[in-house]
Image (cartoon, rainbow, N blue to C red):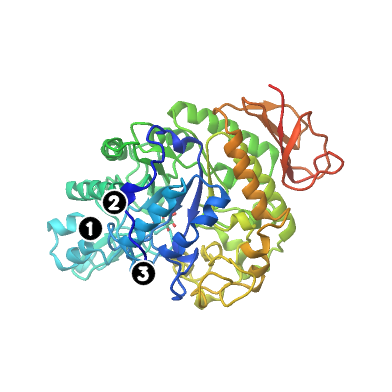
Amino acid sequence: MTEVLDVRAMPDLGKDDAAWWRQAAVYQIYPRSFADSDGDGIGDLPGITSRVPYLRRLGVDAVWLSPFYPSALADGGYDVDDYRDVDPRLGTLADFDALVAALHGEGIRLVVDLVPNHTSDRHEWFREALTSPKGSPARDRYIFRDGKGPDGAEPPADWTSAFGGPAWEPVGDGQWYLHYFATEQPDLNWDNREVRDDFLRTLRFWSDRGVDGFRVDVAHGLAKQLPDELPTQAELDALPKDGTHPLWDRDEVHEIYAEWRAVFNAYDPPRTAVAEAWVQASRRARYASAEGLGQAFNFDLLEADFDAEQFREVITFNLELAETSGSSTTWVFSNHDVVRHATRYGLPPRHGSTDKHGGSWLLSGGTEPELDRELGVRRARAATLLQLALPGSSYLYQGEELGLHEVADIAPDARQDPAYFRNAGVDVGRDGCRVPLPWAREGESFGFGPAAAVMPQPDWFGDLSVEAQDGVAGSTLELYRDALALRRELQSDEDLVWVSTDDDVLAFRRSNGWLNVTNFGARTVALPAGEVLLSSVPLTDGRLPGAATAWLRTEV
Ligand code: GLC
């Protein structure tokens, strides 16, 4: 039985520090594969609570919790049945309160995932919509349209969903509903006042429970304006995404976030939010503005090759962009939607790259193209040190601190991602980065829980487990711990100055003299004068080898 703690009695995390998020290291937990406390093979909230000491020792400032709400898991929890409850397999609201208390007790903030673009098809609203007639208020909460042809037997349009297959689904009475993602994820109609009010209630519900912020799923998709005569998919694709597209990044979406901002600002400190918005870079600033969600993901480093020039461009551009919004930028290499960066960097350029929803298709079968595991991890360590030295927030994904690779060879019957099933296995989907974490060298689930994990783990997980790396000098886990501790100590204002070096090397300095040098090439290079604080691999006679990063303290 989890003890219920009173979150209000917990230490004050610094009410004055309304800007805590600007340069936070945020650790993403995919709850079903983090830690299983009750042996049902699925990770749960008490499992996370039991690992709070690990998170404190790791040194992260905040946790972002992927969806933990009741869900049939048609899309890994991004199909939400009830926005104001906990999936019984993951625990109870009391377990949630205990998690908040445990995190706050260690000075760690909590950001929860909010999925406003669509509910699940088991949500009470959708069930009501299905039993209600055409034109009813219940149907108006979603996007229903009459089918074409006799009896409406043909879809209103030929649109395809993000996971493959048609985006319109018939309900048997001549009407069809829009689901841009899986069939089980009907899109909400955000023109409906009741939808808006209910989400305001949800924001307050979690904020009142002590949640510090929200990660907003598909933030660019909420406002839709479908013309009577629907365009074809080809026509949709050809339309500019400049604020007028029927589905994406419409200007009116910011009216919704202005209402949310009023809720956030009613708390002390104000609740924060970060938008997952796949929009043109120039249009990110509005999502990130102080009148809007406050911060927006930039996935540009994630999409870059391990290449000095590409990194430099991305960094310069995003720091400039952050100035236009007044927000701080965000750096991400891995998350629950993409091939882990240790793996991407061990594949030939572009092979490990991602499209926006997974794109791990080039890893199909796990053997082609051949993965250079060591090079991948070495580069990932170098990239992560660079990331943690940058101004702005760093978002880290569970398991990357262990140097975990993508699990590429999951048997078809063990896969769960709709991105795999909806395209007949052409894209292997995102399960490979969602395999339950290895905590121990041995055991049925490598310490994930008392029994086997629902999703199988590969044999090589044991050697990368927390137990195998804990206290081992040079392990990836210890590198992350050292880097996160130093980052806290060295954290400076949000300025960055490039220091000139040769082509394959990127060096930048923060205002307080904290200098990051990353060698993207193969040659060993000299380091500038300064005290070396940390390096991603041992230096060679004081010089920086290829695919490596060093941090130095220099005179200002
Ligand atoms: C976001 C999530 C992804 C999910 C999709 C639909 O892109 O990150 O995991 O499948 O939205 O909710």
Query: Residue flagged by tag 2: what amino acid is it?
Result: Leu
In front of the other: 462 or 545 = 462
Tell me, for residue 230, which label it has, or none. Answer: 2
Picture coordinates of residue 340, whole percent (x, y): 59, 57
Tag 3 near tag 2, CB within 8 Å:
no
Tag 3 near tag 1, CB within 8 Å:
no
Q: Is mark 1 within 8 Å of ligand 1?
A: no
Mark 3 vs mark 1, foreground winner is: 3
Residue that label 1 marks? 145
Residue found 30% across the figure and 65% down from its top: 169
Label 1 residue SS: strand
Q: Quadrant of the C terminus?
A: top right
In front of the other: 281 or 259 = 259
Q: Is residue 483 left or right of residue 45?
A: right
Tell me, for residue 1, which label it has, or none. Answer: 3
For the residues labelled 2 and 1, the Cα–Cα distance comes to 10 Å
Judged from the image, the quadrant occupied by ligand 1 is: bottom left
Q: Is residue 318 left or right of residue 499?
A: left
Tag 2 near tag 1, CB within 8 Å:
yes
Q: Residues within 10 Å of mark 3 (few under 14, many from 20)?
A: few
Query: Residue flagged by tag 1: what amino acid is it?
Result: Arg
For the residues labelled 3 and 2, the Cα–Cα distance comes to 54 Å
Mark closest to the chain's N terminus, 3 or 2: 3
Q: Taking 427 as reference, is 295 above or below it?
A: above
Q: Residues within 10 Å of mark 2 (few under 14, many from 20)?
A: some
